[in-house]
Amino acid sequence: MKLKLPDRTIKPRSKGLSNLVDNGYGLVELADKLDLCADYVDIVKLGWASAYITKDLYRKVALFEKNGVEACPGGMMFELCWWQNKIDDYVAWLKDNNFKMVEVSNGSLDIPELQKNKMVEFFANKGFIVLSEVGSKDITKVSPPDEWAKQVKNDLNAGAWKVILEGRADASAGVYRSDGTLIDSIINRVLTDIPADQIIFEAPHKSQMVWFLNRLGSNVNIGNVSLGEILNLETLRLGLRGDTVTTFHNNNMQH
C-alpha cells in the first residue's frame, strides 16, 4: 500500500529540518530512539550549557554522527565563554569533542548585537556550521519586528547557516507571549525579507508545530523538539494526524 503524501525532503537536507533538544538523555535511550527515527532528526542541540557537564560527551556526539544527526552545544555555552573571554578555548573544546556545528546567541547574557554578529563570522571562518539565534529569553525585553528582521539578515550575511527564532524550551518568550501564543507580527515581518527555509522556528508544543506547518508547509524547519515528539512531528509533516491532514491532503482525499 502506498499513500499519497506531501513531498518531503530527505537527509541530508537544508529545509524541513527537525531540531531535537537534548535535555540530558542517556546513550541507551538515545540509541533506541534513533534506531527508530533517525531519518526524522537533523540537528540535536545539547540544551543550555549541559554539554559542559555531560559524561562521555564524545561518545554522545559520535552516536549522533553515526545516525546522520549534527550535534551542537546550546547557545549558553557560547555566551558563557564570550563573557569569560574563553572563545579560543571554546574552539579547542569544540574540536576536541568533534562538534562541527556551533550556536551563537545573546538571549541570556547581555552581549551587544554587533559582537554577536562578529562571532557568527568568526566561527564561520573557523569552518563551523553556525546556527545563530535571535531574540531574548527575558520576557520583559520586547524588540520591534523590524529589529528582528534586521538581526536575522545581519547574521545570515555574517555566515550563519540558519537563524533560530527564540522561543525558549517552554514557548514563553521570544516569538511567544508568556501564555505560549505566537506574536504573529514578528513572524510576518521576518518572512517579508527572509525565506522561511533560512529560519528555524522553535515550536516545542504540538499546537505551535501545527501552526507553522499549516502556514509554511511540511518542510518548514522546526526547533526545540523533545525526544518523544520526533515521530509525532514527522506524522504532522506528512498529514498523518488530524491536525494537518486537511492542509496537506485536500487535493488527494477521496470520499
Image (tube, helix red, strand yellow):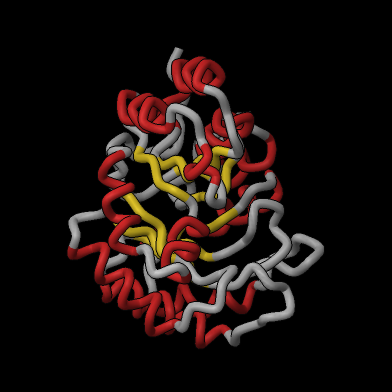
For residue 19, say whether it is visible: no
Image coords of residue 29 (percent x, y)? 56, 19
Measured as percent of width and height from the top left, residue 83 is found at 47, 71
Instruction: Give residue 18's position: percent from left, percent from top.
Output: 47, 42
Tell me which residue sits at (27%, 76%) in the image. 157
Expressed as whole percent of the image width and height from the top left, the position of residue 115 reads: 38, 80
**Which of the two residues, 166 or 74, is positioned nearer the viewer here?**
74
The foreground one among 75 and 87 is 87
Residue 20 as seen in the image, left or right of residue 208: left
- Residue at the (56%, 51%) spot, across then down: 48
The image quadrant of residue 132 is bottom left
The N terminus appears in which quarter of the rendering? top left
- Give above or below for 94 relative to 33: below
User: Hey, which residue is sitting farthest top in the picture?
Assistant: 1
Specify the quadrant of the image occupied by residue 151. Answer: bottom left
Measured along the vertical axis of the image, is residue 177 above or below residue 205? below
Q: Quadrant of the C terminus?
A: top right
- Residue situated furthest right in the rendering: 179
Residue at left 33%, top 27%? 62
Q: Is residue 101 left or right of residue 24?
A: left
Label tally: 0
- Residue at 64 percent across and 33 percent down: it is 241
Is residue 246 at all visible to an observer of this figure? yes
User: Is 99 situated left or right of 207 in this image?
Assistant: left
